[in-house]
Amino acid sequence: MVKDKIGIFDSGIGGTSIWKEIHELLPFENTIYLADSANAPYGIKTREEIVALSRKNTIKLLELGAKIIVVACNTATTNAIQELRTEFDVPFIGIEPAIKPAALKSKTKTIGILATKGTLSSQLFSKTSELYTQDLKVIEVEGNGLVELIEAGKINSEEMDILLQHILIPFQEQALDYLVLGCSHYPYLIPKLRHFFSNDISIIDSGEAVARQTKAVLEKLKILNTNFQQKGECKFYTNTNPTVLQKIINPEKEEFQVKQKKF
Ligand code: DGL
């Protein structure tokens, strides 16, 4: 098997928000995306379970010809990337909540972080948070239930509106000017979040930064595809019904196909 693809995995469809950034920045790269939706959500699982699932996804991506692996899941990155880096001889790119830019730019010195329980309770997250938020008020909120609704294709549903109204209560009456999205599923909620925060709040996610980092590492390791004649091939696999994934990667026209696979 030729190792010529950027392998990307997430607990489900959320990591496609990262894939989109990668594909936009590196259109000539072949990509392969694994949506482990059968095991979503990861955010309420134990660290051991998250490590085991991340290992399983990595093995599959390597079998399928990955030259680099993007862990397009904050929960898997913050809980498992150290183990993955120790165990596998392939470069890994992870995604973490963008606390640093929010902390540096906040004028009100109050920032919000919306992430999964698994991310907020991880050691890696605590370390980063401690490093950059000493003089800030940080409001951390668990987005319990959001991933399940997004996975079910219910982004624009009444259920979602009701859940968001409830989840976002701790941010109300706070002077926050930055909201950090610490889960790769959440960028799909940005229009709804904008609606909720009537003030001019900046919402940041890490997708673009991950794409830039992926490019930088491919260049450094000299494994960037330099054939600029034809666009890369993008493959998508899910271990559940492909309908929701199929829709999210093809918002306008049916360009990409999703295959169902056991992994
Ligand atoms: N997309 C995953 C993340 O970034 C969602 C985690 C989950 O499945 O709970 O954290």
Image (tube, rainbow, N blue to C red):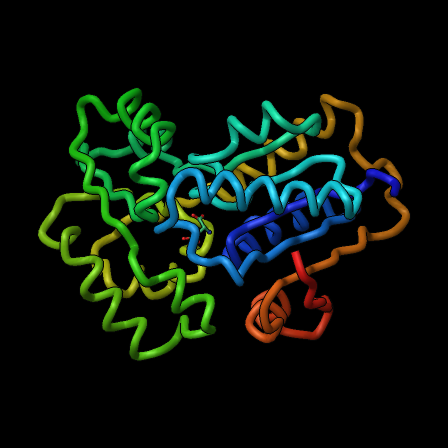
> Left or right: where does residue 225 sit relative to residue 57?
right
Residue 53 in the image: state x and y as whole percent: 54, 46
> Left or right: where does residue 139 sit relative to residue 31?
left
Which residue is drawn at the image coordinates 17% and 23% (left, top)?
A: 135
> Left or right: where does residue 249 sit relative to residue 14?
right
Q: How many marks?
A: 0
Residue 93, quarter of picture: top right
Tell me: residue 263, above or below residue 76: below
Residue 91 in the image: state x and y as whole percent: 67, 28
Which residue is drawn at the image coordinates 30% and 46% (left, top)?
A: 117
Q: Quadrant of the C terminus?
A: bottom right
Which residue is drawn at the image coordinates 69% and 63% (left, top)?
A: 261
Q: Which is nearer the eye, 70 or 24? A: 70
> Left or right: where does residue 2 sit relative to residue 181?
right
Q: Which is nearer the eye, 86 or 259? A: 86
Residue 60 in the image: state x and y as whole percent: 70, 47
Residue 121 in the image: state x and y as whole percent: 29, 37
Tell me: residue 210, above or below residue 15: above
Residue 150, quarter of picture: bottom left
Which residue is drawn at the image coordinates 35% and 43% (left, top)?
A: 118
Tell me: residue 222, above or below residue 41: above
Q: Quadrant of the N terminus?
A: top right
